[in-house]
Image (cartoon, rainbow, N blue to C red):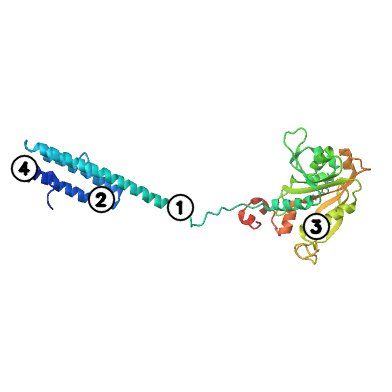
Amino acid sequence: MTTDPTTLTLAQLGDATPEKVAARFAEVRERFDQQVAVHSARQDAEEWRGFVVAWTGRKSSVLVHIGDNWLKPAAKELKPIVGQELNKLKAHVEATLEEKRKEIEAAAEQAAAARDQIDLSLPGVERAIGTRHLIRQTFDELLRIFLSIGFSVVEGPEIETPYYNFEALNIPEYHPARDNMDTFYIEGSRAGHLLRTHTSPMQIRTMEKQAPPVRIVVPGKVYRRDNPDSTHGFMFHQIEGLAVDTDITFCDFKGTAEYFVREFLGPKAKTRLRPSYFPFTEPSAEVDATCHVCGGSGCRVCKFSGWIELFGAGMVNPAVYGFVNYDPEKFSGFAFGMGVDRLAMMKYGITELPLLFQNDVRFLRQFP
Ligand code: 2NL
């Protein structure tokens, strides 16, 4: 390996004439130009910085060596020419490096732009859109049916007074019907506010405000103290209905019930009424439909009876009219109440009630 000439003085190199000095500088310049070509072609920012420092750095770069070893100790008569040559070399090196720096930066910018370019042929990101919850779907279906025969929808508060939840519905304090409507009372409420046990309070409130004819359905959450298991919880969803007018008879109720059953379960479903009891209706009935699984021949779902219980109903007890100032001699009507969660479980073959409230998407996505 030959010694780097910039680490020796001109005297040591034997360059004693201006021509020899110029030739020395030309040699360095030649070396620089060759290295620029090599390093700028690499397009490596790190390596490029190293190269720049090796030529122009403040410490032991080529230019510093030349200043220290060629210029400073130069013979007096050579000094001006060495100074001139060094200035020319410096100008050349600096101008070249600046030019190359711009080129390299522009190339890096172009490369980045090419990398970031959007490929319009790639498939898009598909976002999962939600579905209506099965309870919501069932509500919507039930409301559709009742809206189609002239009922309107009314909603109201979940916290009620004992008057609207019990008294006005002909369930006095001592009445045994309160036992299975055991519910949640609001602590500290002097008026004895409670979570409603049915949506009937809204029907009372509607009748208080509005003279017949009344045809409403009231959907919503209701609460009853219960021991939770696979078919019971302390909250369920209900739709109650009420139709009051002059000349409404049990036949109107029966026709409405049959229409509803056929709409909800299909045209082949048959309806059966069984006597029942509610304090707020008289007479009262349970509405059954032929089993939607076996069609009435008997199976596990209907416990081999062929029938499934759908909801409770009856003619509004005249005692209720007394609380809302309706004349029981002039008006009559029917009312019904159905558990939406029960209907959804029955229709879709769900055996575990908690699945409806855990909101596990693996369950929910089965009902798109
Ligand atoms: C059931 C049974 C029923 C009613 C609710 C009602 C409301 C008024 C007057 C008369 Cl304002 N009746 N509602 C009538 C019969 C049955 O619900 O099993 N619900 C889950």
Residue at horizontal 88 percent and vertical 45 percent from the top:
245
Q: Earlier in the sequence, mark 1 or mark 4?
A: 4
Secondary structure at badge 3 equals helix
Screen quadrant of the C terminus: bottom right
Question: In front: mark 1 or mark 3?
Answer: 1
Report helix, strand or loop for mark 1. loop
Q: CA distance from mark 2 to mark 3?
A: 86 Å
> Residue 284 at x, y = what percent?
87, 51
Categorize mark 2 by other alpha carbons within 10 Å: few (<14), some (14-19), many (20+).
some
The residue identified by callout 4 is: 17
Q: Which residue is mark 2?
A: 39
Lower sequence index among marks 4 and 2: 4
- Residue marked by disc 1: 118
Label 3 crowd bin: few (<14), some (14–19), many (20+), radius 10 Å: many
Disc 3 from disc 4: Cα separation: 118 Å
Nearer-N-terminus badge (2/1): 2
Does the residue tagged 2 have its C-beta within 8 Å of any atom of ligand 1? no
For the residues labelled 4 and 2, the Cα–Cα distance comes to 33 Å
58 lies above or below 150: above
Q: Nearer the viewer, mark 3 or mark 4?
A: 4
Q: Nearer the viewer, mark 4 or mark 2?
A: 4
Between the C-alphas of marks 2 and 1, the distance is: 31 Å
Q: Could you tell me which secondary element the residue under label 4 belongs to? A: loop
Q: Dot 2 lies on which element?
A: helix
First in sequence: mark 1 vs mark 3: 1
The residue sitting at the right extreme is: 329
**Label 2 is placed on what type of residue?**
His
Q: Amino acid at mark 4?
A: Thr
Q: Which residue is mark 3?
A: 261
Asked whether the beta carbons under mark 1 and mark 4 sit within 8 Å of each other, the answer is: no
